[in-house]
Image (tube, rainbow, N blue to C red):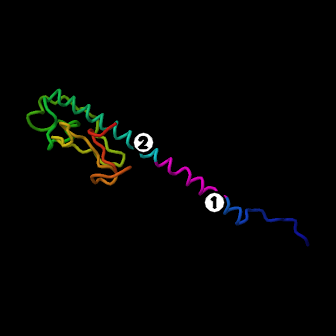
């Protein structure tokens, strides 16, 4: 008896060609995609820092000074204890934003980069210095 059934499918060579074409396409697209991710991170950081700076200015208008180093950015969300609590007219932010890597922004009073106060992130590596996603961003170097 003769069977009319034929096997259908892809040969190994056909599969290898498709995988090679996909790898070449990914290699061509990946660098552009990575540049866009870093650019989006920088835009988000700049927006977050400007938002916190604005809240700090409103805090200063009510309390005649910026939050102390010990009060930190938490003073924008909940009333600090002490003499400034009477003038506190917040919350100035609903919640403290985190950088794109899930780390809360840091605060320095007095600032060290020519600003009265500084709001900054140390990037993905959370260590001073770096490039790309590891770059330090603060209110002193925003575009």
Q: Secondary structure at mark 2?
A: helix
42 drawn magenta: no
Give yes or no for contact between labels 2 and 1 (Cβ–Cβ under 8 Å): no
Q: Position of residue 73 (x, y in %)?
A: 21, 40
Q: Secondary structure at mark 1?
A: helix
> Is residue 133 shown above or below 1?
above
Please, which residue is most extreme toward the right here? 1
Kindly identify the residue that appears in the image at 24 percent across and 45 percent down: 106
Q: Which mark is residue 4?
A: none
| Image quadrant occupied by the C terminus | top left
Which of 106/42 is in front?
42
Q: Position of residue 93 (x, y in %)?
A: 27, 34
Which class describes the residues within 10 Å of circle 2: few (<14), some (14-19), or many (20+)?
few
Position of residue 35 in the picture relative to residue 119 (left or right): right
> Is residue 11 shown above or below 30?
below
Q: Which residue is mark 2?
A: 40
Q: Which residue is mark 1?
A: 20
Kindly identify the residue that appears in the image at 60 percent across and 56 percent down: 24
* Number of marks: 2
25 drawn magenta: yes
| Image quadrant occupied by the N terminus | bottom right
> Is residue 129 shown above or below 6?
above
- Magenta part of the protein: which range? 18-34
Which of 114/26 is in front?
114
Secondary structure predominantly adopted by residues drawn in magenta: helix
Please, which residue is most extreme toward the top here? 61
Decide which of tag 2 and tag 1 comes sooner along the chain.
1
Which class describes the residues within 10 Å of circle 1: few (<14), some (14-19), or many (20+)?
few
Query: Quadrant of residue 120 in the image?
Result: top left
Q: Position of residue 87 (x, y in %)?
A: 13, 28
Position of residue 136 in the picture relative to residue 82 (left or right): right
Q: Position of residue 45 (x, y in %)?
A: 34, 41
């Amino acid at each position: 008896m003769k069977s009319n059934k034929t096997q259908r499918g892809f040969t190994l060579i056909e599969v290898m060609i498709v995988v090679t074409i996909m790898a070449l396409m990914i290699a061509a697209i990946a660098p552009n995609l990575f540049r866009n991710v870093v650019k989006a991170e920088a835009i988000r950081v700049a927006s977050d820092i400007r938002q916190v700076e604005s809240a700090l200015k409103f805090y200063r208008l009510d309390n005649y000074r910026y939050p102390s180093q010990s009060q930190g950015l938490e003073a924008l969300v909940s009333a600090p204890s002490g003499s400034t609590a009477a003038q506190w007219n917040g919350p100035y932010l609903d919640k403290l934003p985190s950088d794109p890597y899930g780390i809360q922004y840091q605060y320095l009073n007095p600032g060290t980069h020519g600003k009265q106060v500084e709001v900054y992130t140390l990037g993905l590596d959370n260590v001073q210095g770096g490039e790309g996603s590891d770059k330090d961003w603060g209110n002193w170097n925003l575009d």
